[in-house]
Image: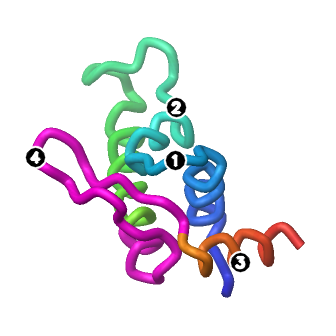
Amino acid sequence: MVLSNDERELLKLVAQAGRPVWMSEYFPVLNPAEPGTDENHPGHEAWTERQMAWYGVSISLWKRGLVRVVVPADGSRGDLVEPTGEGRAALAAADA
């Protein structure tokens, strides 16, 4: 199974956690804001669009069966997920 670079990077972080996680907690790690970025910063809009794109990446991982929801969202936090066997195999193949 071929992973995009974004899928690989997010799935790798989820797998390395060793516990169920919110995928969105890794978005700022994968796409850090420049120092001083606020709503008036020239790069703010592009940064925000990239942050939103990570949600699409996380949905793709779930739709492809590479992560599974362990604890569903409850309104105060998102789904907690972990990699599936297929997700771990896809990472292994990507690293080979």
What label does residue 32 carry, if any? 2
Q: CA distance from mark 1 to mark 4?
A: 21 Å
Determine whether the residue tagged by mark 3 lies in a helix, strand or loop.
Answer: helix
Q: Label 1 amino acid? A: Arg
Q: Position of residue 10 (x, y in %)?
A: 56, 55
Determine whether the residue tagged by mark 2 lies in a helix, strand or loop.
Answer: loop
Residue bearing mark 4: 75
Q: Is residue 74 above or below residue 28?
A: below
Residue bearing mark 3: 89
Q: Is residue 56 above or below residue 54?
A: below
Proximity of marks 3 and 1: CB atoms separated by less than 8 Å: no
Q: Nearer the viewer, mark 1 or mark 4?
A: 1
Tell me which colouring the rendered structure shows: rainbow
Looking at the image, tell me whether mark 1 or mark 2 is earlier in sequence order.
Answer: 1
Looking at the image, tell me whether mark 3 or mark 1 is earlier in sequence order.
Answer: 1
Magenta residue span: 59-83
Q: CA distance from mark 4 to mark 3?
A: 32 Å
Taking the spot 67% from the left edge, 87% from the top edge, the residue there is 1
Q: Position of residue 47 (x, y in %)?
A: 41, 39
Proximity of marks 4 and 3: CB atoms separated by less than 8 Å: no
Taking the spot 43% from the left edge, 12% from the top edge, the residue there is 36
What label does residue 61 carry, if any? none
Q: Label 2 amino acid? A: Pro
Looking at the image, tell me whether mark 4 or mark 3 is earlier in sequence order.
Answer: 4
Looking at the image, tell me whether mark 1 or mark 4 is earlier in sequence order.
Answer: 1
Proximity of marks 3 and 2: CB atoms separated by less than 8 Å: no
Q: Is residue 17 magenta?
A: no
Q: Label 3 amino acid? A: Ala
Determine whether the residue tagged by mark 1 lies in a helix, strand or loop.
Answer: loop
55 with respect to 86 (left or right): left
Q: Nearer the viewer, mark 3 or mark 2?
A: 3
Residue bearing mark 1: 19
